[in-house]
Amino acid sequence: MKKKILFFCDPGIDDSLAIIYTLLHPNLELVGIVTSYGNVTKEQATANAYYLLKLANQEHIPIIPGAANPVQQDPVTYYPEIHGAGGIGPIQPQSDMKYQIYPFDTIRYLFNKYGKELIVVDTGRSTSLAIAFILYNQEITNVGAFYIMGGAFFVPGNVTPLAEANFYGDPTSSNYVLKYAHNLTIVPLNATQDAILTEQIIQHVIQQTTSPFRDLLKPIFLYYYKAYQKLIPGIHGAPIHDLLAIMLINNPSIVNYIFYDAKVINGTGEAKGLSYIDLRPTGQNGKTRIATKLNYSLFIEDFIDVMVNTER
């Protein structure tokens, strides 16, 4: 039986690759996409999600627009230099696309329909997921598991020296989700910063695959890679952070884990968005599974296997 995925995201190049991977995976079924602000505006993220579903001929999958701003109503920063003005690098979905969007309450319907079969993945700011917890506090207890891409534990951040972008973007919502989500896996920069794809790997996939995303892969990867070459001089590829959160659902052995309950610092100071755990001798292990060291060879093997073997 395929694992049912409800995907909260803000595509974004790495979110887009995560969506593509999910659509191609033989053991995963994407049952809904909740779009929100982050890498791009909510409106652009929604259009990008539909564009990817259209390429895959999967327009029946509901797209559910979520939050447009964080809880704190701080000014939202977008990242066209990393993801492109439209969020998918040099690719510009048609501006006149017509598509159906679904009301936010569709999330409650999916919680009830799939129950323990449903896995929620959040690779963007957690505002929309926190709202779902608040609105559907009973129904959400039936969800099977949660995977959150966010945080950086004892490694540098990527949006400030201390903070990872998703937790920094709405630390209040991130804290809420980390507190109330059960069967939770956090996938932080500790692991995702090493989830690097290279031009050679992408070229290999393009040569082998017949998927509807074949012509999309190289231009969006190269755009992303060039951005990372400016951010991290000498890097030999681009880290596809959000992809790893999806990948661990079916292949958890790709990373090592520690078990601690995490928190995120709120406020507006230099520590905003910092994620932390209690490592003191008196600190206790928690129930939250936090990904740490990545097994790079397993990561690449899994990526190529799913992206090339597209018979579903």
Image: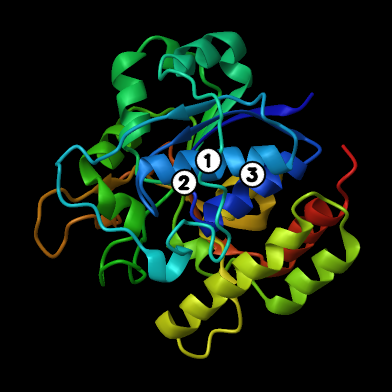
Foreground: disc 1 or disc 2: 1
Q: Earlier in the sequence, mark 2 or mark 3?
A: 3
Q: Is residue 253 left or right of residue 93?
A: right
Residue that badge 2 annotates: 123
The three-letter code of the residue at mark 2 reads Thr
Task: Count residues near mark 3 (Cα–Cα under 10 Å), then give few for <14, some for 14-19, many for 20+.
Answer: many
Above-or-below relation of 26 to 217: above
Give the camera-side residue of 121 and 293.
121
Q: Earlier in the sequence, mark 1 or mark 3?
A: 3
Residue that badge 1 annotates: 96
| For the residues bearing labels 1 and 3, Cβ distance under 8 angstroms | no
| For the residues bearing labels 2 and 3, Cβ distance under 8 angstroms | no
Above-or-below relation of 296 to 61: below
The three-letter code of the residue at mark 3 reads Leu
Label 1: state its secondary structure.
loop
Residue shown at 78%/35% (left/top)? 27
Task: Count residues near mark 1 (Cα–Cα under 10 Å), then give few for <14, some for 14-19, many for 20+.
Answer: few
Foreground: disc 1 or disc 3: 1
Q: Earlier in the sequence, mark 1 or mark 2?
A: 1
The three-letter code of the residue at mark 1 reads Asp
Give the camera-side residue of 117 and 205.
205
Quadrant (top left, top right, bottom left, bottom right) of the C terminus: top right
Q: Is residue 191 left or right of residue 161?
A: right
Label 3: state its secondary structure.
helix
Quadrant (top left, top right, bottom left, bottom right) of the N terminus: top right
Residue 255 makes an appearance in the image: yes
Give the camera-side residue of 93 and 201.
93
Residue shown at 9%/60% (left/top)? 269
Residue that badge 3 annotates: 52
Residue shown at 83%/71% (left/top)? 204
Residue 26 is situated, as x and y percent measured from the top left of the image, at 81, 38
